[in-house]
Amino acid sequence: MHPLFCSSASNSMSSNKFSTPIHGLALVLLITSLASTTSSCREQEKTSLLRFLAGLTQDGGLAASWRNGTDCCTWEGITCSTVDGMIEEVSLADRRLEGRISPSLGSLASLSRLNLSHNSLSGEALLSSHSIAVLDVSFNRLSWNLPQEQPSSSALDRRHMQMQVINISSNSFTGQLSPATWGMMENLVVLNASNNSFTGSIPSFLCQSAPFLTVLDMSYNKFSGSVRPELGKCSMLRSLKAGRNNLTGTLPDELFNVTSLRHLCLPSNGLHGALDPALIIKLINLVVLDLGWNMISGNIPDSIGQLKGLKELRLEHNSMSGELPSALGDCRSLVTMNLNNNDFSGELGKINFSTLSNLKTLNVGWNNFTGIIPESVYLCSKLTVLQLSFNKLRGQLSPRARHLKSLTVLSLAGNNFTNIKSALQILKSSSDLTTLLIGSNFRNEEIPGDETIDGFENIKVLAMEDCQLFGKIPLWITNIRDLEMLFLFNNELTGSIPVGIGTLNFLFYIDLSNNGLTGEIPAGLMEMPMLRSDTITTSLDPKGSELPTYSGPSPQYYTLGAFPALMNLGNNNLTGVIPPEIGQLKALVSLILGFNRLSGEIPRAISNLTNLEALDLSNNHLTGTIPGALNNLHFLSRFNISNNDLEGSVPHGGQFDTFPSTSFDGNSKVCASMLVHNCHSVEVPKGSTEQGYKVMFAIAFGVFFGLGVLLDQLCLSRLFG
Ligand SMILES: *[C@@H]1O[C@H](CO)[C@@H](O)[C@H](O)[C@H]1NC(C)=O
Ligand SMILES: *[C@@H]1O[C@H](CO)[C@@H](O)[C@H](O)[C@H]1NC(C)=O
Ligand SMILES: *[C@@H]1O[C@H](CO)[C@@H](O)[C@H](O)[C@H]1NC(C)=O
Ligand SMILES: *[C@@H]1O[C@H](CO)[C@@H](O)[C@H](O)[C@H]1NC(C)=O
Ligand SMILES: *[C@@H]1O[C@H](CO)[C@@H](O)[C@H](O)[C@H]1NC(C)=O
Ligand SMILES: *[C@@H]1O[C@H](CO)[C@@H](O)[C@H](O)[C@H]1NC(C)=O
Ligand SMILES: *[C@@H]1O[C@H](CO)[C@@H](O)[C@H](O)[C@H]1NC(C)=O
Ligand SMILES: *[C@@H]1O[C@H](CO)[C@@H](O)[C@H](O)[C@H]1NC(C)=O
Ligand SMILES: *[C@@H]1O[C@H](CO)[C@@H](O)[C@H](O)[C@H]1NC(C)=O
Ligand SMILES: *[C@@H]1O[C@H](CO)[C@@H](O)[C@H](O)[C@H]1NC(C)=O
Ligand SMILES: *[C@@H]1O[C@H](CO)[C@@H](O)[C@H](O)[C@H]1NC(C)=O
Ligand SMILES: *[C@@H]1O[C@H](CO)[C@@H](O)[C@H](O)[C@H]1NC(C)=O
């Protein structure tokens, strides 16, 4: 009996048709008596469907097809049995249905498949149906309206429960999955309850009540407590997913009895303990092991090399340590290896990467790895993401990196690599490369000039910040036509800003701060097409790349999220006026021009930058009055014009009522009720010296913009969103 259920379940999961014997028979019947019998629906079933329709407040056009007086077997989304004309399947996914699911659907006695996924339905989840085998009500607004509304055990009759596949994911269900109700579903093969608000412990009782349970997806809920040892009794389980919950404790030894497991995914919980070398190899069928974002400690056991089918190994953001076992090179199926943000140490060269020919993502950033990049890495020709940032690696990029034809993201940032000129020459012809992060390396080298570098035809993000690079901003940068983000802050670049930067059609994030740039702000910068547009469109794939930004005294890296349109030219030696055309860059969210030698007035046109959240013009030689229209900038939350030669009164109203007096300090001729220095006080000379600027700027930037917390959250939501 049970094997039959199981095989028919896998049948019905893989195709829309019913089990082959019955279907075959039906076909014979149909052919022999085609002229005389046509399936037509029964009046009672039609009435049930019309009740369901009547319960909808928005039917997505269904009423045009579902008309009383016509055969309901011909209605959209309805499939009847060719044998007896009873309704077998209702398939109304993604039909823009709104309203309540009428319990009347539950009275369709032969209904075995119901798919109402991706609508906006509330009401009855139909879990107590006696006929349904495959139920998909995912992506709706279902909830238990009353705590008692869960199908009670009295309403469920174990002998008649057909449920094999249940997908109630992405709804608003709450409460616990109790044995009294869910324990009745002894034919259950797949239960997907992800992305709700279920509480209590993972329903391990299912392992006993539903011996054929194969897939259990409980991720994105509020489950807590430990991973129960009873899960070890789920002897058919292939997929256990419970990431993004509040699970604690260690993985029970019994879990490793489930040798059928292919996917073990428990990321973003509070799990701790180490991977036991003797236990992990029992899961010989593992394809995905995802324990990222927990508190796992210890090292990666040698025995992992015996998991020949392992494709994804995700252990990022834990507290794991030690050297990597060379046996990792035996996991020949590996496609993704993410060990980012642990305390691993030793040389990467311990692994012979040449055997990992399927590897596409290698992320070992934010560890304590030493030595050079092993040459064997360059033999992984399918590599698309290579993330080595923030370790203690040294040496030069090997010319063999040219073999990595599929490389799209390369991050070497925060190591001790040398010879930027050679690195750029090797990488310039990598035609798939979109993101190149090499900041915090190459200390005190000269930025390579135009005679040697061209190419980078697909680069969208280029980060060479914090290297103390000297020289002029080279013109080859202005030829990277797809460039969207440019990070050159914290270098020792001199000369003027190349006009050509203003011609880059997609550039919306430009950070040249903290260099020794001189000359005027080029008028060409005021023409930047993306900053002049209403919305920023980016083709960047946020996955895999981490971009540099400030959060305190040193740069940090964050995954690309909704990076705001930014122009940061702060802490240079720019002179001249702020071009009034700046008012055209209406996409700008941050405009930082502080710590320069700019003169003239604050252009009135800045009040047209209505998206502006941060405006820093501090520590310049600006004169004249503060434009009153600036109080139109409703999103402005950071404002600093301190240490200039401005005069007159501070505008009233709008955001201006929220800025502290430090925003205006050091302008002896500015008066406002809140300022210590009012119009009649004695002029106070500027306090800070040029040498102090760099330090002050770094601190001011970190505190002033507080990007850290915001971006950290973005980063998390991106990784799991
Ligand atoms: C459908 O038509 C039948 C017979 O014409 C009628 O009895 C019934 O009330 C109708 N149902 C609805 C929902 O209009
Ligand atoms: C329900 O329909 C959606 C959309 O067509 C589909 O993605 C999903 O796989 C279906 N569910 C089942 C259980 O077949
Ligand atoms: C719901 O889950 C079932 C089983 O995992 C799956 O076949 C179906 O495609 C899922 N539905 C959607 C809309 O993803
Ligand atoms: C569960 O359903 C979600 C859709 O809500 C889907 O993304 C996920 O892959 C499903 N889980 C399994 C194990 O099929
Ligand atoms: C969770 O459900 C919400 C609402 O249906 C949906 O917007 C969101 O994309 C889902 N998240 C996941 C990870 O499936
Ligand atoms: C997780 O559980 C702990 C106690 O077990 C509790 O203090 C904490 O608030 C929970 N966190 C969430 C996000 O539910
Ligand atoms: C399951 O694992 C536990 C602990 O590792 C062990 O004692 C027990 O014998 C195992 N049970 C089976 C059925 O293999
Ligand atoms: C790595 O493995 C390849 C073949 O699998 C072998 O030829 C090579 O010598 C190995 N390299 C090292 C450093 O062991
Ligand atoms: C990194 O390794 C060095 C020794 O090589 C050690 O002193 C240091 O504490 C390690 N740092 C971390 C964060 O583990
Ligand atoms: C980088 O390497 C050089 C020598 O190659 C060494 O002098 C320097 O201290 C290293 N810097 C860091 C930050 O490790
Ligand atoms: C600006 O120029 C002055 C002298 O010309 C120099 O002393 C100062 O260090 C420069 N500032 C920066 C940030 O480069
Ligand atoms: C602001 O923009 C409007 C329309 O684009 C323009 O007419 C106006 O002159 C601008 N204001 C300033 C002060 O530049």
Image (cartoon, rainbow, N blue to C red):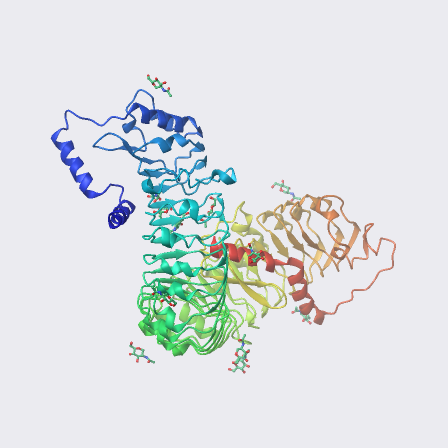
Q: Residue shown at 36%/45% (left/top)?
A: 185
Q: Nearer the viewer, residue 687 or 709?
A: 709
In terms of depth relative to the viewer, which is nearer, 411 or 148?
148
- Up the image or down, 120 lies above or below 379; here it is above
Residue 625 picture location, percent across and down:
76, 50
Nearer-the-camera pick, 116 or 692: 116
Left or right relative to 677: residue 160? left
Quick check: 633 left or right of 153?
right
Could you tell me if residue 543 is visible in this image? yes
Question: Is any part of residue 169 visible from this angle?
Answer: no
Q: Position of residue 477 (x, y in %)?
A: 49, 63
The image shows residue 38, relative to residue 225, as above or below, that is above
How many numbered marks, from 0 up?
A: 0
| Quadrant of the image where one finds ligand 1 | top left
The percent coordinates of residue 233 (x first, y second) are: 36, 59
Q: Residue furthest left?
A: 32
Q: Is residue 258 left or right of residue 196?
A: left
From the viewer's side, name the closer residue of 133 and 234.
234
In which quadrant of the rendered view does residue 61 lie?
A: top left
Q: Where 552 sits versus 345, above or below?
A: above
Residue 387 as seen in the image, left or right of residue 564: left
Considering only vertical position in the picture, is 320 above or below 590?
below
On the image, the x and y values in percent for residue 42 come to 28, 25
